Image (cartoon, rainbow, N blue to C red):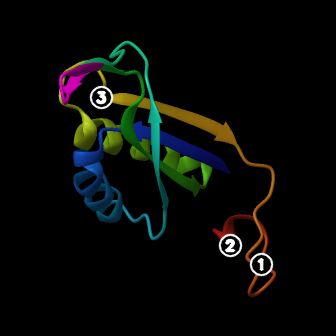
Amino acid sequence: MKKVEAIIKPFKLDSVKDGLTDIGIKGLTVSEVKGYGRQKGHTEIYRGAEYVIDFLPKVKIEVVVPDDMVDSIIEKIIETAKTGKVGDGKIFVIPVEEAIRIRTSETGESAV
């Protein structure tokens, strides 16, 4: 199993969620996060004072899937989250050793 984490622009969340649902993903976790990369940040003026906004709002999507679904998930996230501009985000794939469903004590892929 693998955990796929994607950090995307917040306004792309609905299209990514819909795309993942279309390919059979039944559940995912979404977190509001802040960060920066090549996009850096920007400055804003509030009541005459200039502020540097270093951390930009992003959304992190996490989904744990069988190994054979990873490529299709990555393709779907890229297809639905891409704007072609700096700050589109990143995708990380992480190995998962075990998964356990608390309610039923199922383990492995059946727990996902």
For the point 37% across and 29% down, which residue is it?
89
Task: Return the x and y of residue 42 as percentages of the image width and height.
Answer: 27, 18
**Which of the 4 image quadrants contains residue 102?**
bottom right
Of the residues under marks 1 and 3, which one precedes in the sequence?
3
Which numbered dot is residue 106? 1
Seen as rendered, the residue at the extreme bottom is: 104
Circle 2: is it few (<14), some (14-19), or many (20+) Cα within 10 Å?
Answer: few
* Majority secondary structure in the magenta region: strand
* Region rendered in magenta: 44-50
User: Quadrant of the image for the C terminus?
Assistant: bottom right
CA distance for labels 2 and 1: 6 Å
- Look at label 1 and name its amino acid: Glu
30 left or right of 18 in image:
right
Splitting the image into 4 quarters, where does residue 53 fall?
top left
x, y (%) of residue 58? Answer: 38, 39
Disc nearest the viewer among 1 and 3: 3
Distance (Cα) linking label 1 and label 3:
36 Å
Asked whether disc 3 touches disc 2, contact meaning CB atoms under 8 Å apart, the reply is no
Pointer 1 local density, CA inside 10 Å: few below 14, some 14–19, many at least 20? few
Is mark 2 in CB contact (under 8 Å) with mark 1?
yes
Q: Is residue 23 above or below residue 67?
A: below
* Nearest to the observer: residue 29 or residue 77: 29
Residue at screen point 60% across, 54% down: 66
Q: Position of residue 1 (x, y in %)?
A: 67, 51
Please state if 104 lies on the left or on the right of 45 as rendered.
right
Nearer to me, 59 or 70: 59
